[in-house]
């Protein structure tokens, strides 16, 4: 297996992690059940799969949000956490240029630039979480505290409450 930039950063930071590969079917739209399918392929609880959402504030600042893939981000909570008036997801065709990663393979670790990062507080409920390794078909398994440390993230509530 070829090391990704995310893995090299974890190695250089002396952070313990594991990896797990899966057959990538090219389906990366969460509303179509991508997180559930990934969890099924890996034999893990879907709540442990964390997605990376890259957004742009009205100030043009790029912000990174990371949360359980089964949850929807609450934009008001995201704006409040970042201290901005507005946020919107970056377009998929901008993702590679901004982060060095493609949709379905975007890791919160090892982006081209250091962006302010926010991780949903539910991460602390897990012993290990699964994040993209920086390529489709590969996940990094990491302790939440190590993910927070390496990304220098703010841990906060980001989830849209279900009614």
Image (cartoon, rainbow, N blue to C red):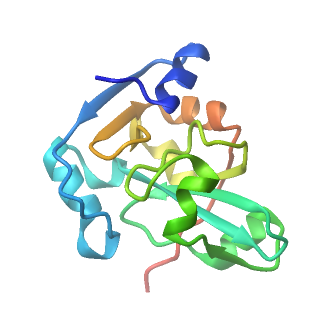
Residue 1 lies in what quarter of the image? top left
Q: Is residue 44 visible?
A: yes
Q: Position of residue 44 (x, y in %)?
A: 22, 44
Residue 137 lies in what quarter of the image? top left
Identify the residue at image location x=32%, y=47%. 136
Q: Is residue 23 found left or right of 35 in the rendered image?
A: left
Identify the residue at image location x=68%, y=50%. 117
Identify the image quadrant of the C terminus. Answer: bottom left
Q: Is residue 95 found left or right of 153 in the rendered image?
A: left
Identify the residue at image location x=46%, y=72%. 72
Q: Is residue 119 visible?
A: no
Residue 22 lies in what quarter of the image? top left
- Nearest to the observer: residue 80 or residue 6: 6
Identify the residue at image location x=22%, y=51%. 39
Q: Is residue 48 found left or right of 137 in the rendered image?
A: right
Q: Position of residue 73 (x, y in %)?
A: 53, 71
Q: Position of residue 26 (x, y in %)?
A: 24, 59
Residue 37, above or below 152: below
Outermost residue to the bottom: 163
Residue 160, above or below 26: below
- Nearest to the observer: residue 158 or residue 130: 130
Residue 141, above or below 90: above
- Nearest to the observer: residue 149 or residue 114: 114
Q: Position of residue 102 (x, y in %)?
A: 45, 54
Q: How many marks?
A: 0
Q: Is residue 80 found left or right of 106 in the rendered image?
A: right
């Amino acid at each position: 297996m070829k090391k990704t930039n995310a893995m090299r950063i974890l190695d250089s930071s002396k952070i313990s992690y594991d990896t797990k590969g899966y057959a990538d079917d090219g389906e990366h739209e969460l509303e179509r059940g991508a997180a559930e399918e990934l969890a099924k392929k890996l034999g893990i609880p879907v709540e442990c799969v964390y997605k990376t959402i890259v957004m742009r504030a009205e100030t043009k600042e790029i912000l990174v949000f990371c949360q359980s893939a089964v949850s929807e981000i609450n934009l008001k909570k995201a704006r409040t956490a970042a201290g901005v008036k507005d946020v919107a997801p970056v377009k998929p065709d901008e993702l590679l240029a901004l982060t060095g990663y493609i949709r379905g393979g975007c890791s919160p670790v090892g982006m081209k630039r250091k962006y302010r990062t926010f991780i949903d507080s539910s991460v602390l409920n897990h012993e290990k979480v699964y994040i993209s390794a920086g390529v489709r078909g590969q996940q990094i398994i990491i302790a939440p505290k190590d993910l927070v440390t390496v990304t220098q993230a703010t841990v906060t509530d980001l989830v849209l409450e279900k009614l």
